Image: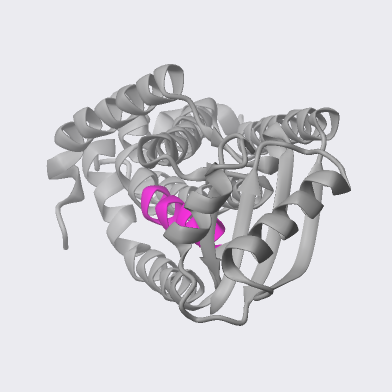
Amino acid sequence: MIAFNKYYNKFNILSVSLVVISLLFLLFKGLNFGIDFKGGTLIELRSTDSKINVSSLRDNLNQMNLGDVSVKKFGNDTDYLIKFEINDNKNVIEKIKTNLDKSFGNNFNFRRVENVGPKVSAELLRSGIIAISVALALMLIYIWIRFEWQFSLGAILALFHDVIVTLGLFSLLGLEINLSIIAAVLTIVGYSMNDTVVIFDRVRENLKKYSDIKIFDLTNISINETLSRTLITSITTLLALLSIFFFGGEILKGFSLAMIFGVIFGTYSSIYIANTVLVRLRVSQKTILKEEE
């Protein structure tokens, strides 16, 4: 049996430190919102000349005063994804076409052009915040009904930890936040809650079964009893996400990376945050029996 409870205090300090650092990054550095949330233009290009590279393309576009320009490889080696802040009309696109033809020759095929205005982007941002808030609120209500308040508090703190630390990492690394990342965060919330509920169910069963075992040791027993299920779920999910990250193309990289962070943090928090709350609140068999009366 692995002595997870031996490291409760050390990992509690680590968790608090991660949350504080993440909040500081979110407060002072902020998030790198993509076109979905701050507006702008997205262009997907395909080049017929393999000698053209990202840096030469970026240097050329930077001379056009388009604001903050992002140029990335997209899919094949000759495919490029260009993003910039101006969300103007066809005139800007025509100017870009003319400029690229002049600099590189007629070697580009404009496969896709998308514009997101400031009003639409503000609405998308507001909708994303509402979606995450509603998901957290519904999870809170479910866990409050499903378990005693001590269990609910542990699950809520674990969820808070997973979301904040994942967003903090995105802030630290300067990774773009778009609609797919919001979807990833919502998925992380569900995944983390599922992991926590599985362990909590076993803790409740063991509390009813063993009246002479203290919660410090009982949580460790419960974690070990559900460990194979937790590891199998996490590892298989991570393998799928790693495949998406490496082979799914540029569009899915942000989503898969957020999910990878979330699965790791969700597995960790279900063991070292949710359960340590029960230990610190000294949950016992009396707690369960009292709530059932």
Q: Which residue corresponds to the image point at 59% horizontal and 52% vertical from the top-left?
A: 184
Residue at the outermost front position: 102
Between 147 and 20, the residue placed more toward the observer is 20
Point out the image quarter for the C terminus: top right
Left or right side of 15 for 198: right
The residue stretch that appears in magenta: 252-266
Point out the image quarter for the N terminus: bottom left
| Residue 254 magenta-highlighted | yes
Left or right side of 257 for 180: right
Asked which quadrant contains residue 35, the reply is top right
Residue 6 spot, x, y in % from top left: 12, 43
Between 251 and 281, the residue placed more toward the observer is 251
Above or below, 160 relative to 202:
above
Asked which quadrant contains residue 132, the reply is top right
Above or below, 74 relative to 157:
below
Left or right side of 62 for 41: right
Q: Which residue corresponds to the image point at 37% horizontal and 63% vertical from the top-left?
A: 226
Q: Which residue corresponds to the image point at 66% horizontal and 50% vertical from the top-left?
A: 183
Residue 38 spot, x, y in % from top left: 69, 32
Q: Report if residue 186 is visible in the image.
A: no
Residue 170 spot, x, y in % from top left: 44, 41
Above or below, 246 relative to 97:
below
Between 288 and 156, the residue placed more toward the observer is 156
Mark count: 0
Left or right side of 201 for 206: left
Q: Report if residue 217 is visible in the image.
A: yes
| Residue 268 magenta-highlighted | no
Q: Main secondary structure of the magenta part?
A: helix
Residue 34 spot, x, y in % from top left: 62, 41
Q: How is the image coloured?
A: one colour
